[in-house]
Amino acid sequence: MDKIYLDNGATTFPKPKEVPDAVYKYMTEVGANINRGGYQTAYDLEGTVFETREMLTQMFDGPDCKNVVFTENVTESINMVLKGFLHSGDHVLCSSMEHNAVMRPLVQLQEFGVTFSRIPGNKFGELDLGSIGGLIKSNTKAIVMTHASNICGTVNPLKEVGEICQKHGLKFIVDCAQTAGVLPISMKEMHIDALCFTGHKSLLGPQGIGGFILTDEMVDQVMPIITGGTGSVSHTEETPGFMPDKFEAGTMNIPGIVGLNAGLKWIEERGLQNIADHELGLTMKFIEDLKPLEDAGLVKVFGLRTKEGRVGVVSIQTLNVDCADAAFRLDFEYGIMTRVGLHCAPNAHKTLGTFPTGTIRFSFGNFNTEDDVNAAVKALEEICRE
């Protein structure tokens, strides 16, 4: 049985051939570290890492490539930024659609005197912009927000929120896990002070690589929470104050960076708009083809029904079949791989009205086709009409 992968919201698969080829070449022909070797191979590798920082800075319209910090994933990035920036007595705002990558650090920080309020959203996952002003307090320090929901794909209006942050003197911290590599992001135009990304989703890199980008002003306000060897200023036991060494301690995931480099080049060659058009075209076909099942009361689709304001993530509930059973059958009987449950975002499900049941999530990627959509809809129809 052929398999159909519709779980690109978790990690994209397959990757462009250039990505595993680049990782394999590094592992078999290079194998060195950067900042640790006084030989040409290590120097050449540093050039690849520097190029990757430059490409990320260009993609996100960031301030300076030295302000790109590599981590293991977006969760580590968010933890490093929030825990290095917030202190006892600080208050932050977040959306009601946040992933636990944001919520668990905020809940944990409550033990250290940090408080937070949620900006409400509607049943489509859309942010209530008008409520933000009333939630800002004298000790509010930042707004932290996902760019797009990992459950229903609804996109938050970053530029408008960034302007609110500018008006009130707040820092803007953004989680772009679901949008980096699909939607255009400008740190400058959106007034983003810290952008946290992961490499293994739509940036098409391997798992285990991510990062964050800080403005120059934000660099001075975030304390590093992981320190150690950097290969620089090794005559002192003090942590370097310059970027990116201030935050990059220990051996880096060079295979991940090399793979990410290849993924970024593939995206640049194909074009963000072409990628978005392809994924959203499949998304809209899926939603439209499910309408007969929805009209028959067999499934319910959550989130926006328009191409605007969303990414290629769709969640549904099967109304006469347990969602977990339906997802199991999709895989074992039809070879269709999805994700079922609460997707590490319980409050987002409460906002959408899908808690505690959860949903089956279908997320479309670069290499999916209309045939994949047809197969998924046909399988759902057979499962739901039995």
Image (cartoon, grey):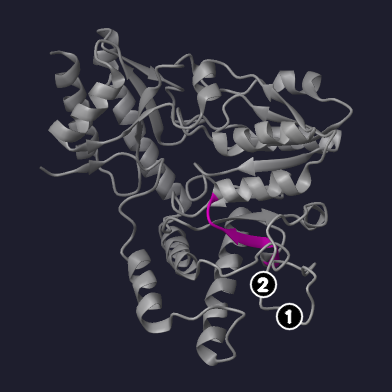
The residue indicated by pointer 1 is: 234
* Amino acid beneath label 2: Gly
Image quadrant containing the C terminus: top left
Of helix, strand and loop, which one carries label 2? Answer: loop
Q: Position of residue 151 (x, y in %)?
A: 45, 29
**In the image as oriented, which residue stretches furthest toward the bottom?**
39
Q: As drawn, is 329 to the left or to the right of 41?
A: left
Query: In which quarter of the view is residue 56 placed?
Result: bottom right
Q: Is residue 12 visible?
A: yes
Which residue is located at x 49 percent, y 55 percent?
199
The answer to if 339 sits in the magenta stretch is no
Q: As drawn, is 221 to the left or to the right of 337?
A: right
Q: Is residue 189 visible?
A: no
Callout 2–callout 1 Cβ contact below 8 Å: yes
Q: Nearer the viewer, residue 290 or 250?
A: 250
Of helix, strand and loop, which one carries label 1? Answer: loop
From the viewer's perspective, is residue 235 above or below residue 327? Answer: below
Tell me the crowding category of disc 2: few under 14, some 14 to 19, or many 20 or more residues within 10 angstroms, Cα based: some
Which residue is located at x 41 percent, y 55 percent?
204
* Amino acid beneath label 1: Ser
- Magenta-highlighted residues: 66-73
**In the image as oriented, which residue stretches furthest toward the right?**
138
Q: Position of residue 120 (x, y in %)?
A: 64, 19
Q: As drawn, is 260 to the left or to the right of 383?
A: right
The residue indicated by pointer 2 is: 229
From the viewer's perspective, is residue 218 above or below residue 264? Answer: above
